[in-house]
Image: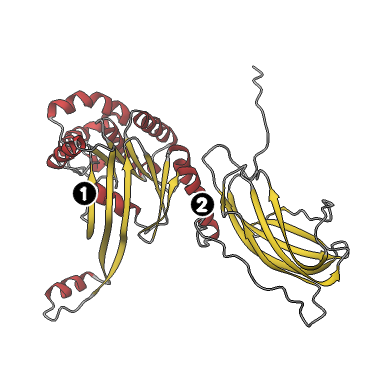
């Protein structure tokens, strides 16, 4: 439930009137540091210590992040446990205060953070509806108008008249969600609240969230079910160790995050600039070396389906000529468990330079039909009809494919649907 009190709600409404660029949430250089203690008594020792001895260690839950969220955006937050997602939501709703920085919100916030947050366990469901309405700045009369729709949505029967301490986790979620979405929020914040509900309840909640989204409500959504974020949100923010890793189009960022969760490698960055290769061509004294791969480079590291992939390879030939010289590329999944595609110039009957010197060729896929995933590229040069391996670079380049949500699987295949009846 929302933890905004009436004064904060009124202040937010005033700020909203001054908000000319439709920004609903602005996070400015926010940091949050928690002090961790090995045992409860250490907290007392530290507070009473005359020498200011530290019995705690600092944990940076958030480390100087900046975010601006516009009206009507639906933003998903992804990241491992401990990445700072829930802390950020608690800061936005005012549940906790920041160590540094500032958060500015505009409009009325409804939030589902932890089950039971904002509830008085001794009060009945009805009494808690009024309680939460008051906390959000509504009058008793305004809440009376909303009671029927809240009760109908919660659908917990006569339990609505029982103390909430007797509720199951599912009942908590139903009542909390029913209150939050039936009070016309300008900002709706949902933190893993749907995970406890049954399938019908989840469908009901998502449908209602879609209605709010279409009506212009700004939505922040945290869930470990990243496919829900990919399908529902317009934007995704990926947090890691209290910092923003990526912030952008929902489908693209969730795909990259999913790749990271599988392979755990450093995130690819399309802003990296490949250094030019300027090494001088030299024929080695060791005559056993006939040729070698000197340099490989991709035109980018993060692709969308149907974009053009270009793989540049520079190779040296040291012999006067290699008549049976050929070149091959292999695409694997990043973990190398799946061999995706492996063309070569011998099979394709492509004519490439075979005489002594330095040569550059481009391997191009005009429209890559991979859907999403993280991939590795091998490159090899061969002689004697591909039998003799002259040089081979294993996983010499990596790339990711990430998209808006438009289909599922590994490849895009042309297809059609026929309605029979």
Q: Is residue 125 left or right of residue 173?
A: left
**Spot occupied by residue 167 in the image (x, y as percentages of width and height):** 28, 40
**Among all residues in the image, which is located at the extreme top?**
421
Query: Which residue is rendered at x = 69% and y = 50% of the image?
Result: 364
Foreground of the two, 82 or 362: 362
Examine the rendered structure and indicate whether residue 54 appears above or below residue 145: below
Tell me if mark 2 has few (under 14), some (14-19) or many (20+) residues whose alpha carbon lies within 10 angstroms of its own.
Answer: many
**Spot occupied by residue 288 in the image (x, y as percentages of width and height):** 82, 79
Residue topped by disc 2:
256
Query: Which residue is rendered at x = 63% and y = 46% of the image?
Result: 308
**Spot occupied by residue 33 in the image (x, y as percentages of width and height):** 26, 63
Query: Is residue 335 in view from this perspective?
Result: no
**Quadrant of the rendering where the N terminus is positioned:** top left
The disc placed on residue 94 is: 1
Query: Is residue 407 in view from this perspective?
Result: yes
Foreground of the two, 172 or 3: 3
Query: Which residue is rendered at x = 23% and y = 50% of the image?
Result: 103
* Kind of element beneath mark 2: helix
**Spot occupied by residue 57 in the image (x, y as percentages of width and height):** 27, 72
Q: Is residue 84 left or right of residue 100?
A: right
Q: Quadrant of residue 221?
A: top left
Foreground of the two, 160 or 255: 255
* Kind of element beneath mark 1: loop
């Amino acid at each position: 439930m929302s933890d905004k009190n009436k004064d904060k709600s009124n202040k937010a409404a005033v700020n909203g009137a001054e908000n000319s660029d439709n920004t609903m949430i602005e996070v400015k250089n926010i940091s949050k540091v928690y002090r961790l203690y090995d045992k409860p008594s250490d907290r007392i020792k530290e507070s009473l210590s005359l020498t200011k001895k530290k019995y705690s260690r600092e944990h940076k839950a958030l480390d100087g992040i900046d975010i601006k969220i516009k009206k009507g955006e639906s933003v998903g937050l992804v990241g491992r446990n401990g990445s700072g997602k829930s802390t950020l939501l608690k800061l936005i709703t005012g549940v906790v205060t920041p160590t540094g920085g500032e958060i500015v919100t505009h409009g009325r916030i409804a939030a589902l953070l932890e089950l039971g947050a904002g509830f008085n366990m001794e009060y009945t469901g009805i009494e808690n509806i009024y309680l939460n309405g008051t906390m959000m700045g509504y009058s008793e009369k305004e809440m009376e108008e909303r009671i029927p729709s809240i009760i109908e949505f919660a659908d917990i029967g006569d339990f609505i008249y029982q103390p909430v301490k007797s509720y199951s986790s599912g009942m908590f979620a139903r009542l909390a969600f029913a209150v939050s979405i039936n009070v016309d929020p300008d900002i709706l914040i949902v933190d893993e609240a749907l995970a406890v509900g049954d399938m019908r309840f989840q469908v009901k909640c998502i449908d209602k969230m879609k209605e709010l989204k279409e009506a212009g409500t700004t939505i922040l959504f945290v869930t470990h079910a990243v496919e829900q974020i990919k399908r529902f949100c317009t934007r995704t923010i990926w947090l890691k160790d209290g910092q923003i890793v990526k912030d952008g189009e929902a489908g693209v960022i969730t795909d990259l995050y999913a790749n990271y969760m599988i392979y755990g490698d450093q995130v690819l960055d399309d802003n990296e600039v490949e250094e030019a290769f300027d090494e001088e061509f030299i024929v080695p004294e060791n005559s056993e070396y006939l040729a070698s791969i000197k340099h490989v480079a991709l035109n980018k590291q993060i692709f969308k389906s149907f974009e053009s992939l270009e793989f540049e390879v520079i190779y040296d030939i040291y012999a006067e000529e290699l008549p049976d010289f050929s070149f091959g590329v292999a695409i694997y999944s990043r973990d190398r468990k799946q061999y995706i595609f492996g063309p070569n110039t011998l099979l394709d009957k492509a004519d490439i330079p075979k005489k002594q010197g330095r040569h550059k060729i481009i391997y191009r896929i005009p429209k890559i039909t991979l859907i999403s995933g993280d991939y590795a590229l091998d490159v090899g040069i061969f002689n004697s009809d591909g039998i003799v391996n002259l040089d081979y670079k294993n996983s010499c380049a990596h790339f990711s494919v990430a998209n808006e949500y438009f289909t599922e699987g590994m490849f895009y295949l042309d297809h059609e649907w026929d309605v029979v009846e």
